[in-house]
Image (spheres, helix red, strand yellow):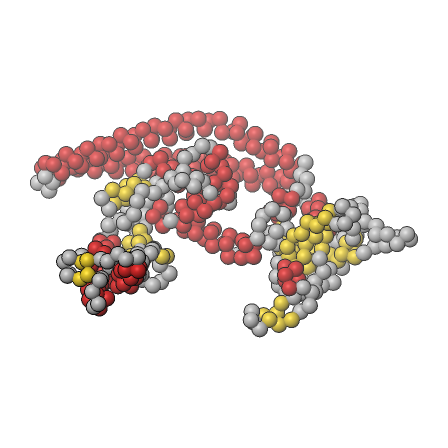
């Protein structure tokens, strides 16, 4: 009876004392213990300790049995996107599998972000497998799930305390149970590994960028040369009502301009770097982008080659692969008769295998017919390619620098104490240097002017002054 009352000695004593204070006594019939007796707590302590020890042993036996079954390949878990769990085995869910393949394709091949993928799935009206709907977190879980390439990793969560039964993430406290090629995969191992490399690149190549938001085109891309911290954006309203948008060193904003050593943090804090106007940084980028020489014909030729390779190869390769699989399954179906005649299969096993393979052959036949239909429709691919090239040609001819474009082309800005700004663009090895200066006219007022150049082989110059509170002078 003591076991049913509580499996924890502390809870047993605590509850009986609380009830006793209220004038309620507990009688344990099987153990002959009544809390009204003087030695009740001593007896409860002994019996409760025995019950607690039994609970511990039971927990260890259950955990040992579960681990042995995991090592045998039994799946502990519930249905997930792309897979149904039945009798400890994973079975591919075709509808969910298509969604998984689409997510990996968008992320790895199309280089889209997790938030963008989640938004597109919502816009397409594709139902999610959980209550929270499609979010970037859900997409990340899909991309990191090794089950989609056929592997199985279990004991990701454990219950270290048998008293609280609280599940926690396994961070090395216990060994994982890993089985490679455990079940039918939804995506290829090569695609899964590319996704992991892309995840690692986007999250750790520049950890500073990953932590900061993407609201502004310079977010996570401006570094202070004095302390190495990031610049943060401020949108301030001045007393005269004017808006002042600046970028300031995070170290200075949080700890002030006085440099000092913080013993608790064991690091130097504070920075005397100067803030920079947002419009000055944009003026630099606009002038650089406008004067970058782009080989438009080379871009169009590359685009045409890529379009043709994608349109001509993707579906045809799928068709050839599926056709080979279809032929192999038909051969397996034909070999069942020989196995049955050789008494390698029982009658029931023969019927079940025939039924399973017949259903698989029919599904593959329908899929091959659909792929064949798509291949026929590709006769109009030339017109599709022509439309894409025409659209790209118009965009190249009317290319205007936008914040989105700055976000894509800018790799890093480094701002020095003297307001020297080093600019590094993606895929271009050279750097540009600019200096922000204050230019006063005869009336002692600041006149907007940009006088710029770079130390790069590509020519960067400004044909007319830009609207900026400061000038940008050649270094």
Q: Is residue 51 visible?
A: no
For the point 69% across and 65% down, the residue is 257
- Residue 452 placed where, x, y %? 76, 53
User: Is 62 left, or right, of 264 in this rendering?
Assistant: left
Residue 205 in view in this figure: yes
Task: Please indicate whether residue 140 sits to the left or right of residue 384 in the image.
Answer: left
Residue 184 image point, x, y percent: 29, 44
Instruction: Identify which residue is drawn at 54% across, 53% down.
Output: 210
Total numbered labels placed on residues in the image: 0
Q: Check the image and name the residue furthest to the front.
A: 23
**Residue 440 pos. (x, y %):** 86, 54
Choose top left, top right, bottom left or bottom right for residue 303. Answer: top right
Q: Quadrant of residue 99?
A: top left
- Camera-side residue of 22 and 310: 22
Residue reaching furthest to the right: 442
- Looking at the rendered image, the quarter that the N terminus falls into is bottom left
Which quarter of the rendering shows the C terminus?
bottom right
Using the image as rendered, state which of residue 247 and residue 473 is in the foreground: 247
Image quadrant where residue 33 sits: bottom left
Q: Name the residue: 57% across, 50% down.
A: 213
Q: Is residue 56 left or right of residue 206?
A: left
Residue lying at 64% horizontally and 40% vertically, measured from the top left = 296
Q: Where is residue 311 drawn, in percent x and y?
A: 47, 34
Q: Is residue 465 above or below residue 171?
A: above
């Amino acid at each position: 009876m003591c076991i049913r009352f509580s499996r924890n000695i502390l809870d047993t004593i605590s509850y009986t004392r609380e009830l006793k204070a209220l004038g309620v006594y507990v009688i344990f019939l099987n153990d002959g213990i009544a809390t009204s007796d003087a030695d009740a707590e001593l007896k409860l302590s002994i019996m409760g300790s025995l019950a607690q020890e039994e609970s511990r042993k039971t927990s260890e036996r259950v955990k040992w049995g579960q681990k042995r079954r995991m090592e045998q390949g039994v799946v502990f878990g519930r249905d997930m996107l792309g897979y149904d769990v039945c009798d400890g085995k994973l079975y591919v869910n075709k509808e969910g599998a298509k969604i998984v393949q689409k997510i990996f394709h968008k992320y790895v091949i199309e280089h889209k972000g997790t938030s963008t993928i989640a938004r597109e799935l919502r816009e397409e009206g594709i139902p999610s497998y959980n209550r929270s709907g499609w979010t970037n977190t859900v997409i990340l879980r899909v991309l990191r799930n090794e089950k989609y390439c056929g592997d199985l990793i279990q004991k990701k969560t454990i219950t270290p305390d048998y008293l609280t039964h609280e599940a926690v993430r396994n961070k090395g406290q216990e060994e994982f149970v890993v089985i490679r090629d455990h079940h039918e995969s939804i995506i290829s191992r090569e695609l899964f590994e590319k996704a992991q490399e892309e995840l690692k690149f986007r999250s750790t190549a520049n950890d500073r960028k990953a932590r900061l938001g993407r609201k502004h085109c310079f977010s996570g891309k401006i570094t202070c040369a004095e302390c190495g911290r990031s610049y943060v954006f401020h949108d301030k309203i001045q007393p005269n009502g004017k808006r002042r948008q600046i970028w300031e060193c995070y170290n200075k904003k949080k700890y002030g301009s006085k440099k000092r050593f913080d013993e608790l943090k064991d690091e130097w804090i504070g920075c005397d770097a100067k803030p920079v106007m947002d419009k000055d940084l944009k003026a630099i980028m606009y002038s650089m982008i406008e004067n970058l020489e782009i080989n438009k014909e080379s871009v169009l030729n590359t685009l045409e080659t890529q379009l043709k390779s994608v349109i001509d190869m993707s579906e045809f390769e799928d068709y050839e692969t599926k056709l080979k699989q279809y032929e192999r399954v038909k051969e397996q179906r034909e070999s069942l008769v020989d196995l049955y005649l050789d008494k390698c299969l029982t009658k029931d096993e023969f019927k079940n295998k025939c039924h399973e393979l017949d259903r698989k052959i029919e599904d593959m036949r329908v899929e091959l017919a659909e792929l064949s239909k798509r291949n026929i429709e590709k006769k109009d691919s030339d017109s599709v390619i022509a439309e894409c090239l025409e659209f790209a040609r118009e965009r190249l001819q009317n290319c205007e620098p936008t914040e989105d474009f700055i976000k894509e082309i800018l790799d890093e800005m480094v701002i020095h104490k003297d307001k020297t700004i080093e600019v590094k663009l993606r895929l271009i090895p050279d750097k540009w240097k600019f200096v922000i200066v204050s230019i006063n006219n005869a009336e002692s007022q600041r006149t907007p002017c940009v006088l710029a150049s770079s130390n790069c082989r590509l020519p960067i110059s400004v044909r007319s002054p830009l609207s900026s509170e400061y000038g940008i002078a050649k270094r």
